Amino acid sequence: MTALPVLEIGGSHVTAALVDMADGTVAHRGRGGLRATDPVGMLLRDIAETACRLDAPAGATWGVAVPGPFDYDTGIGRFHGVGKFASLNGVDVGAELRARIRPHPHALRFLNDAAAFGCGEWQWGAAKGHDRAVAITLGTGVGSAFLDRGRIVADGPRVPPEGRADLLTINGQPLEQTVSTRAVLAAYRRAGGEACDGVAEVMARVAHGDERAAGVVDEAYRLLGRALAPWLRRFEASVLVIGGGISAAWQFVAPPLGQGIQSADAEVAERVTVVRSPDAETSALRGAALRASALAQR
């Protein structure tokens, strides 16, 4: 059997699916709701219930894409002071889910959600055929993956510290204070805009001609391009793939992002293809399956 069971865990949802390792086909996808502020028992229950609805074989190795901070080798949550999944801090999530999922898995192999997204894009998506690729997810925070022929690069002079774009700074402040959901909403409020429930609402106001919203969005993603440009050069990337919830408004994100790269490094702007992932969740599921497959064969 070439299909592997996988989970993709986000701040408000969990998705379970089977991924065919022969061609990356994702089947039997099911989704359940999560609340990142729930107590540990409820979170584990909701994740396990979604997993149990998947027709997975007994004794399978599951791939699990989950946001950090997380100890991916041991399966222990490290969500201290980050405003999400606080009840999973210090919890052996792997052991707890193995006990709850039916039929019981042999093992769960964890991977950062942005890294899973990048791996899926490199193997079967927009980064396929590129030796070196950078994948960025834009949503509640900023996720990133630097891939050299499909291998995640997390240290060395060619990548940011820990391979994390969220640790970069621009104009003297952390990148996430410029381009995350909360940063865009805060900037819009400072510009005199009305309160919004999320970035999608800000983008909708851009579409309806709100100049304050357009100015905030333009500034945020122009700065993102400027912050990424030096690392695209150092890594010698030939493609930058963007995913995450904010990328849904690609027509408003792409122009300033490209202009920011161009203003920082015209040669990089000429050489690097910038593209939006058509389905970031599918790529994350595929990347989780690649993680499970690689470790299961050791």
Image: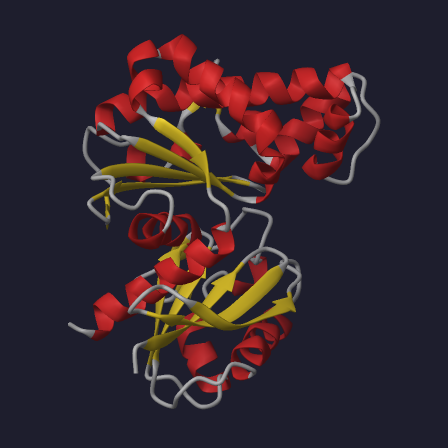
- Would you place residue 129 above or below residue 50 in this image? above
Residue 79, horizontal then vertical, whole percent: 50, 54
Residue 139, horizontal then vertical, whole percent: 57, 41
Q: In the figure, residue 146 lies in which quadrant?
A: top left
Residue sitting at x 30%, y 63% = 290
Residue sitting at x 70%, y 38% = 200
Q: Nearer the viewer, residue 39 or 253?
A: 253
Residue 266 lies left or right of residue 173; in this view the side is left
Viewport quadrant of the C terminus: bottom left
Q: Nearer the viewer, residue 46 or 233?
A: 233
Viewport quadrant of the N terminus: bottom left
Residue sitting at x 60%, y 18% = 218
- Would you place residue 67 above or below residue 25 in this image? above
Residue 153 lies left or right of residue 115; in this view the side is left
Residue 280, horizontal then vertical, whole percent: 49, 50
Residue 151, horizontal then vertical, whole percent: 22, 49
